[in-house]
Amino acid sequence: MNNDALPPIPAVQTIGLTRMYGNIAALYGLNLTVNKGDLFGFIGSNGAGKTTTLRILATFLAPSAGTAQILGHDVVRDADSVRHVIGYMPDFFGVYKDMEVTEYLDFFGACYKIPTAQREKTVNDVLELVGLTEKKGALIGALSRGMQQRLGLARVLIHDPSLLLLDEPASGLDPRARIEMMAILQELQRMGKTIIISSHILSELQTLCNRVAIIEKGKLIYIGPVQGVRDQMAQGRVVWVRVSSEPERAIELLKTRSEVSEVATLDGEIKVTLANHETDHSIVADVLVRGGAKLTGLREDEIGLEEVFMRVTKGDTQ
């Protein structure tokens, strides 16, 4: 059997997941599926419910209603089993600044009951994975913010979890440190880890993640492939055209087509707005060439994840 035809296996599944604080729903009826091997982007404004969701999945917060399963384990009834298969990195985590890097990781290795004889190799392995081998003897307080974030990631990897729950792991990092962090996450995905990452750095999630969810005011408003959300929101997608002569003729040709909703000129280019996102922009080239126009350039505006996010959310919080 072709493995490509096999259906994806859920690593995380929530049904009707709800969390109330008094009369306020921080999370309401969340139905979320994250498949094994996903590098999954969880997107939402501050206060939208991302951290609440991750804390429930990490067994630190009980849901008010609904269920959540991680690799077949219920987060309420089988919390201990869940904790053995996840690594949770909160948006803010404390470090012992007077400890050395290896001491810190050895301590957490002991907490996970990794045998003493095995811990040194495990610590060295995770340090190599996150690029901190050269800092193994350094005091944590002397590390940069980016290195402390990588150390936090090493800590959640110490027991080799299958699922990583990372709440804003690149928060506060400079551009180079963010890029390095994202490269580490891609390597972890290649190793077979399933990763859920919440982030506001949407341009990076756009290229990093294979699937995303958008949440607002505790409710899920989109889940699926990154390209899917762009296509869903790309009504009125725009194609820019250049012709070598007679732009007026090209404009008239384009205006005759029902697939085109608007045509205008700007800085020597013809701006063509298509009627809907399902229309292939090759129709523009076909119309012009068949009509005798000499086409010298064609490009489509790429709608970015940040623009999608701004379109589908209102910025409302609880």
Image: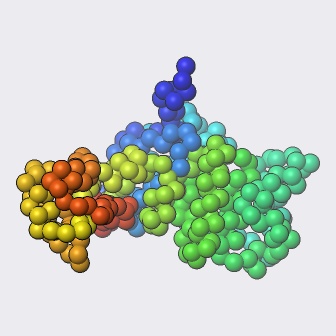
Depicted 101 relative to depicted 254: above or below = below
Residue 107 x %, y % = 80, 59
Quarter of the figure with residue 151:
bottom right
Q: Is residue 55 visible?
A: no
Residue at the far right in the pictured view: 117
Asked whether, in this view, residue 184 is left or right of residue 11, the answer is right
> Who is closer to the viewer here, 169 or 262?
262
Asked whether, in this view, residue 128 is left or right of residue 81, the answer is right
- What is the count of numbered marks? 0
Q: Residue sitting at 65 percent across and 53 percent down?
A: 187
> Who is closer to the viewer here, 61 or 98?
98
Depicted 177 relative to depicted 153: above or below = below
Residue 233 x %, y % = 27, 55
Asked whether, in this view, residue 2 is left or right of residue 105, the answer is left
Q: Tell me, what colour scheme is on the image?
A: rainbow
Asked whether, in this view, residue 315 is left or right of residue 40, the answer is left
Q: Is residue 282 visible?
A: yes
Which part of the image, by quadrant, shows the N terminus?
top right
Which part of the image, by quadrant, shows the C terminus?
bottom left
Q: Residue sitting at 74 percent across and 71 percent down?
A: 96
Residue at the far bottom in the pictured view: 142
Q: Residue sitting at 58 percent across and 77 percent down?
A: 174
Quarter of the figure with residue 152:
bottom right
Residue 192 x %, y % = 64, 42
Residue 246 x %, y % = 15, 68
> Who is closer to the viewer here, 302 or 284?
284
Q: Residue sitting at 92 percent across and 48 percent down?
A: 117
